[in-house]
Amino acid sequence: MKIKDITDVIETFAPLRWQESYDNAGLVVGRGEDEVHAALLAVDVTEAVLDEAERTGCDLVITHHPIVFHALKRFNSADPVQRCVEHAIRRGIALYACHTNLDSAPGGMSWRLAGQLGIGSLELLQPAAEPGVGFGVVGNLGAETDTMDFLRHVQRELAVGAIRYSAVATPTVRRVAVCTGAGASLIGEARRAGAGLYLTADMKYNDFMTPDNALTVADIGHFESEYCAIQLLFDILSKKLCTFAVRKSECSRNPVNYLV
């Protein structure tokens, strides 16, 4: 099957025009007309993931994060990005990323994570110009829930080593906002949407003061919040390409370790 036959399926769900201007989603290594036999799904392109692709006969690696985010000026194996790109080219492995376009797609990343955590009746947190497109979601739990109990549920469900959170604004919560990845910029939107709790990642020190006790904000980890990309991409592809082999990476690992 040609690469473009596979990427067309992904881009029907999450067109590249929905990616942010700073992003580099799409085909990073390879050509659309190239023939491939199997795809490996991961959060990031790493040397371990590329080794896994070779072992399992996958000549296409599809990730959430693009391996090349900033311009590369040389290829001399000086860092992991250069080594991964060199490895892929030498071994004939194509690399494709579905990043902020998957984040903002209807039914995309935040929708998937919220559903996994039991949050329903979802609405967009930050709508874009196109209907149904945007970042983050806000919805309701089935019943009023102890805030700390729900955070412990999130920790177990996502296997989070540690959750950082602000002062608990209310002892119980029902309305919860979610944005996968780095979503501190949407704290204001979560507050305006009436959320009692906002789950995201990559929050800085001052971000935990921003809510001013109007809601609780919690940093659940970047990788942990976006690991759902693997299953989401698997579902998108397997429903349309039943004759093409798609594998979920077993070597997609969190680069952050926790001392507990």
Image (cartoon, helix red, strand yellow):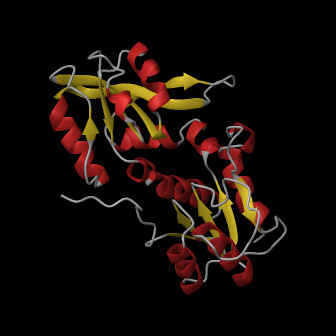
> Where's the C terminus, which quadrant?
bottom left
> Where's the N terminus, which quadrant?
bottom right
Residue 128: percent from the left, percent from the top?
A: 64, 25
Front-most of residues 22 and 119: 22
Lateral position of residue 191 relative to residue 185, left or right? left
**Rendered residue at 38%/52% (across/down):** 224
Q: Say if residue 242 shows up in the picture.
A: no
| Quarter of the image where one finds residue 34 | bottom right
In the rendered image, the vertical position of residue 109 relative to residue 253, given as above or below: above
Counting the numbered discs, the total is: 0
Front-most of residues 115 and 47: 47
**Rendered residue at 48%/40% (across/down):** 182
In the rendered image, the vertical position of residue 154 relative to residue 148, given as above or below: below
Lateral position of residue 120 relative to residue 37, left or right? left
Q: Say if residue 200 shows up in the picture.
A: yes
In the rendered image, the vertical position of residue 73 relative to residue 147, given as above or below: below
**Rendered residue at 59%/83% (across/down):** 54
Furthest residue toward right? 33
Residue 258: percent from the left, percent from the top?
A: 27, 58
Residue 70: percent from the left, percent from the top?
A: 69, 53
